[in-house]
Image: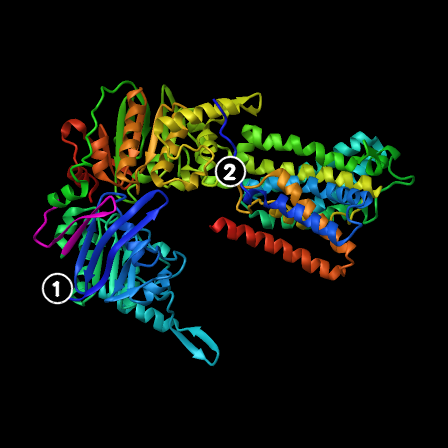
């Protein structure tokens, strides 16, 4: 039997169209925007947030919310660095990601099984995890006496086929995670749970487990981002990753996901990250005052969400 | 006839593909009780919702006291003296009786720019207005502590305090015992004497004959008949409601086979469903009949002990119940469907396990199943990508049935499955239930429409206070009035 043709609707492509318009405008207003150096810079800046935003997309599609990803990334970066100095790169990377997944699991269990509001829960873990980071590091960057292993540092700045390793990470994760969301029963259950938790429950979906699992994905991906961050900063920085959660949530919403749950697409969230990064980059190149930049970025986020509401009201 | 309080002139309203009201004329006069009757989905509630400013008519005009009005919101309707007592009462359970009665118009004491609630006056006013209803609860008690009938009186008290001129009641007796019905009637009669226009919606034709000065019968969104007191009997109304063309057939029974599911409800008589059998559950709101489905399915309250095949089970959650071959069509369609997901995803949701090929989803097999089922249950339009929320109520219900047909469940539990859907879709859903049963399955159905149970079921269990109190068999002349007396309505 023939698969029904997908309808191409313009409204669904708003994030992509916005990004193209934004890039075109930036290219017209400043000649430096299209320079290879600048474009590479945007890609590298986007890569870490993109990994976090993908995890956030899981949680938001599942009907939740996660404020703790910035702290989790810092924790993972520091733990990865500490373990790496003792037991090698592979163990360090694994420890960092596992630490992130553990924070996600804790979030997920509290939210799904104790029915605590996700906003409150992850606000709590955001502060708590940051505290743990400072306690374990004593507040100082983790880089050992002679720095992190050189291969790891090379991963943070090196390139493969002309593209930074850091950019390869989300580029490889995106198709894999998209497959999970769209081509596995698990992914369909996440969408159903977020779109109508009670209806999904009555259809035989173990909704608590599904909700908890989205936080594990989110935590693990925040862990991956933390390891990338450590590689880029050549150390585990206890203060790293602040405001990452807000940038990631904004990007996911710009990518068309609904905070009601059940709606959202991974690649569109990544486009949302690019929108945020290109906007910041263009404002920089145009020498816009950094205080005004914040005003502009905030206004853009609200405008995008309002436009989305107006569209769905029709 | 005295002056018209509210009227609808040539009013039409459609929702998506469904025509809810089609060129309807209606009027209620001051000092008159005007009943509106009709089958589920005939347009009664839509008419009320237009008059109370929730919906705007697509065509036609609304006049209040002779003047054309365009209500932008229920607020406007309330301001012109229209009060509705809906089936689902709009009270705030956590607030007190007095606060609920005063809500929206709280008595205050002013200290310059400051306003403080005048509690003493609020409670005194509440007491006075409740006394008119011969009802004296503690005005400080939270509404949550009252029973259904008492809550309704609080809602009516709220209307009386507003000195409403047009009073609309949407199936007010659905959850009441006979004694409480009598009290409600005397309240309504008094309001009429005081000159209030009363619009009274009910399923219960004997009530309408007893109380109404005039009666309008709606059928499929059109006015089928209007008659004044004395000019109609319950039989006339029933005939006008159903119409010759839409006369629904009584389904034929099949010889039942082995028991599929047996549950020990709290009563003496167990709930038993056999192969090739449709069993009905009848009961007033709060009788436990409406909750029974979810208990059997492991989705609410303490799970009932269920005997399925040879095993005694207690389903802790729907996952287990579904694995044992049970499917649930819940009462509210928003619980049966994930509205912002596609028809395809909804149909496949309980079937993802069977479509999993080493962890990934077999899309082609899924599309094949969805295509076949959309054809079989006649979901319109035939677009699997359409979001479930965009379908009409009848089609949404067919999607919910399709979910379980794809699994070939042994026992289908249906909780008021045809509530608020049009006559044609209702007939199709009845046929589908009959189909499931003919292929050796069993069905247990709760319905608020006793006529539906009488036509569809081989056997109906009547429930009161959480217990099965009577069984009415097809053999023993199963009909609506028999069921009504069995449930104590």
Q: Nearer the viewer, residue A174 or A190?
A: A174
Residue B363: x percent and y percent? 52, 25
Q: Which residue is mark 2?
A: A193
Element marked by disc 2: helix
Q: Residue furthest right?
A: A146
Q: How far apart are labels 1 and 2 at the CA level?
A: 57 Å
Residue A274: x percent and y percent? 69, 45
Dot 2: chain letter? A
Q: Nearer the viewer, residue A232 or B275?
A: A232
Neighbor class of circle 1 (other Cα within 10 Å; few <14, some 14-19, many 20+) is few
Total number of numbered discs in the rendering: 2
Neighbor class of circle 2 (other Cα within 10 Å; few <14, some 14-19, many 20+) is many
Q: Which residues are magenta?
A: B214-234
Which image quarter is the C terminus of chain B in? top left
Q: Which residue is mark 1?
A: B1
Q: Is residue B101 left or right of residue B477?
A: right
Q: Is residue A189 left or right of residue B414?
A: right
Q: Residue furthest bottom?
A: B112
Dot 1: chain letter? B
* Residue drawn 25% across the image and 30% down it: B269
Q: Is residue A274 left or right of residue B486?
A: right
Q: Is residue A276 visible?
A: no
């Amino acid at each position: 039997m023939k698969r029904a043709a997908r309808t191409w609707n313009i409204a669904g492509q708003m994030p992509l169209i916005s990004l193209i318009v934004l890039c075109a405008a930036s290219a017209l207003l400043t000649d430096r925007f299209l320079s290879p150096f600048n474009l590479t810079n945007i890609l590298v800046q986007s890569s870490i947030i993109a990994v976090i935003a993908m995890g956030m997309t899981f949680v938001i599609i599942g009907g939740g919310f996660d404020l703790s990803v910035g702290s989790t990334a810092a924790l993972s970066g520091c733990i990865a660095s500490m373990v790496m100095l003792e037991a090698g790169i592979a163990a360090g990377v694994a420890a960092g990601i596992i630490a992130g997944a553990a924070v996600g699991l804790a979030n997920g269990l509290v939210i799904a099984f104790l029915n605590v509001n996700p906003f409150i829960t992850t606000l709590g873990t955001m502060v708590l995890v940051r505290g743990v980071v400072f306690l374990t590091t004593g507040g100082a960057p983790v880089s050992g006496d002679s720095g992190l292993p050189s291969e790891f540092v090379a991963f943070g700045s090196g390139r493969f086929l002309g593209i930074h390793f850091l950019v390869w990470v989300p580029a490889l994760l995106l198709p894999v995670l998209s497959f999970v969301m769209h081509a596995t029963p698990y992914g369909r259950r996440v969408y159903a749970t977020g779109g109508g938790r009670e209806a999904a429950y009555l259809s035989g979906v173990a909704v608590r487990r599904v909700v908890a699992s989205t936080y594990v994905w989110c935590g693990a991906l925040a862990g991956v981002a933390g390891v990338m961050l450590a590689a880029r900063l050549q150390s585990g920085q206890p203060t790293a990753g602040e405001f990452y959660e807000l940038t990631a949530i904004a990007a996911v919403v710009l990518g068309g996901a609904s905070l009601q749950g059940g709606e959202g697409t991974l690649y569109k969230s990544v486009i949302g990250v690019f929108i945020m990064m290109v906007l910041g980059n263009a404002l920089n190149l145009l020498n816009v005052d950094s205080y005004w930049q914040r005003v502009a970025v905030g206004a853009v986020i609200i405008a995008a969400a309002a436009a989305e509401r107006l569209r769905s009201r029709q | 006839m005295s002056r018209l309080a509210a009227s609808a002139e040539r009013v039409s309203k459609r929702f998506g593909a469904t025509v809810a009201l089609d060129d309807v004329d209606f009027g209620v006069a001051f000092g008159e009780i005007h009943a509106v009757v009709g089958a589920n989905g005939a347009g009664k509630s839509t008419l009320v919702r237009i008059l109370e400013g929730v919906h705007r008519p697509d065509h036609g005009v609304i006049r209040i006291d002779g003047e054309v009005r365009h209500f932008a919101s229920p607020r406007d309707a309330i301001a012109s003296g229209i009060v509705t007592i809906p089936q689902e009462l709009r009270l705030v359970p956590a607030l007190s009786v007095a606060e609920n009665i005063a809500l929206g118009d709280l008595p205050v004491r002013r200290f310059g720019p400051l306003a403080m609630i005048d509690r003493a006056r609020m409670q005194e006013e509440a007491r006075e207005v409740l006394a008119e209803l011969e009802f004296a609860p503690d005005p400080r008690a939270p509404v949550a502590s009252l029973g259904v009938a008492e809550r309704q009186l609080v809602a009516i008290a709220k209307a009386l305090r507003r000195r409403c001129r047009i009073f609309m009641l949407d199936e007010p007796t659905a959850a009441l015992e006979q004694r409480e019905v009598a009290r409600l009637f005397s309240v309504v009669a008094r309001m009429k004497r005081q000159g209030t226009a009363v619009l009274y919606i009910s399923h219960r034709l004997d009530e309408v004959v007893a109380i109404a000065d005039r009666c309008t019968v709606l059928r499929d969104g059109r006015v089928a008949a209007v008659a004044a007191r004395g000019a109609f009997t319950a039989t006339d109304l029933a005939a006008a409601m159903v119409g010759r063309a839409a006369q629904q057939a009584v389904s034929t029974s099949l010889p039942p086979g082995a028991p599929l599911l047996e549950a020990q409800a709290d009563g003496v008589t167990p709930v038993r469903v056999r192969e090739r059998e449709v069993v009905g559950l009848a009961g007033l709101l709060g009788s436990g009949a409406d909750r029974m489905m979810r208990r059997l399915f492991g989705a609410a309250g303490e799970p009932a002990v269920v005997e399925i095949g040879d095993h005694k089970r207690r389903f802790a959650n729907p996952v287990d119940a579904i694995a044992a071959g049970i499917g649930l069509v819940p009462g509210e369609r928003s619980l049966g469907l994930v509205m912002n997901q596609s028809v395809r995803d909804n149909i496949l949701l309980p079937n993802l396990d069977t479509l999993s090929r080493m962890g990934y989803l077999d899309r082609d097999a899924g599309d094949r199943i969805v295509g076949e089922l959309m054809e079989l249950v006649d979901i319109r339009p035939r677009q699997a990508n359409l979001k479930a929320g965009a379908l009409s109520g009848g089609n949404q219900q067919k999607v919910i049935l399709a979910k379980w047909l794809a699994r070939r469940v042994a026992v289908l539990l249906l909780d008021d499955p045809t509530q608020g859907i049009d006559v044609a879709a209702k007939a199709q859903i009845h046929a589908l239930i009959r189909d499931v049963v003919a292929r050796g399955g069993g069905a247990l159905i709760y319905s608020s429409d006793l006529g539906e149970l009488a036509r569809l079921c081989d056997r109906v269990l009547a429930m009161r206070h959480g217990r099965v109190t009577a069984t009415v068999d097809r053999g023993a002349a199963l009909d609506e009035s028999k069921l009504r007396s069995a449930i104590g309505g």
